[in-house]
Amino acid sequence: MIALGSDCLVFRMQSGESVPLSAGMVTVELLGDTATLFDSEFVSQAADAVFYYFKHDLKRQSVTVGEFTLALEKVLRGFKLAEEKENRVVLADLGKLAIESGDGCELFFFPRLRDELRAHLKGSRKILQFRGLRRCVKRLTGAQRWSPRCQTLNDRIVEYLRNCLSAEAGKADCTLMVE
């Protein structure tokens, strides 16, 4: 019997045939929509990573084509979901809105906040993330340290965003995050 190369895995085909392949010899063809999502270099690197996983992490000498394909599909799906999630999140900076509204100008801040929310709801975004709430509150109150007045304004802003979202979003499935 011939010894298997240290950089090879035996791929067991559905036909019962076993073929020793190195990571560089594994070729992957993507069909349908998947082919347009990833470039060939990316898929090649993902296949190399899956190969390494079976060979070194699991210390396997052989693998079925189905197992390899399933693992590669899981890796690529993970990258696709990460990309979708990234595209679904819209960020808004509350601190910037407070600066644009002027020092201590809650009167101008709340209408600007509602306009910002409306603008982001027009897209197909599913997660609206408003950041910088603490900085925003301190700017609007003119406070250096957090105080009960700051907490009150903090709660008003969050409640205002919730009310605006429920009024503006209609039947849109949307998540609001305020931090």
Image (spheres, rainbow, N blue to C red):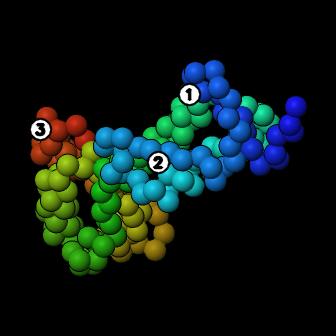
Give the foreground label among 2 and 1.
Answer: 1
Question: Is tag 2's residue or tag 1's residue first in the polypeptide sequence?
Answer: 1
Which label number is shown at residue 140? none
Q: Residue at x 50, y 57 (%)?
A: 42
Q: Quadrant of the C terminus?
A: bottom left
Q: What element carries label 3?
A: loop
Question: Is tag 3's residue or tag 1's residue first in the polypeptide sequence?
Answer: 1
Give the foreground label among 2 and 3.
Answer: 2
**Does 81 sit left or right of 112 as displayed?**
right
Q: Which residue is drawn at 71% across and 39% down?
A: 20
Amino acid type, callout 2: Phe
Query: Is residue 152 at least partly visible in the picture?
Result: no
Query: Is residue 28 at least partly visible in the picture?
Result: yes
Q: In this view, does 63 lie above or below 3?
A: above
Circles 2 and 3, Cβ within 8 Å, touching? The answer is: no
Distance of label 2 from label 1 (alpha carbons): 20 Å
**Does 68 sit left or right of 151 as displayed?**
right
Q: Which residue position holds label 1?
A: 66
Q: What element carries label 1?
A: helix
Q: In which quarter of the image is the N terminus?
A: top right
Q: Which residue position holds label 2?
A: 79
Residue 125 in the image: x percent, y percent? Answer: 24, 50
Give the foreground label among 3 and 1.
Answer: 1
Q: Which residue position holds label 3?
A: 170
Q: Which image quadrant is residue 17 in? A: top right
Of residues 109 and 64, which is closer to you in this image? 64
Amino acid type, callout 1: Gly
Q: Residue at x 63, y 21 (%)?
A: 16
Amino acid type, callout 3: Gly
- Dot 3 surroundings within 10 Å: few (below 14), some, or many (20 or more)? few
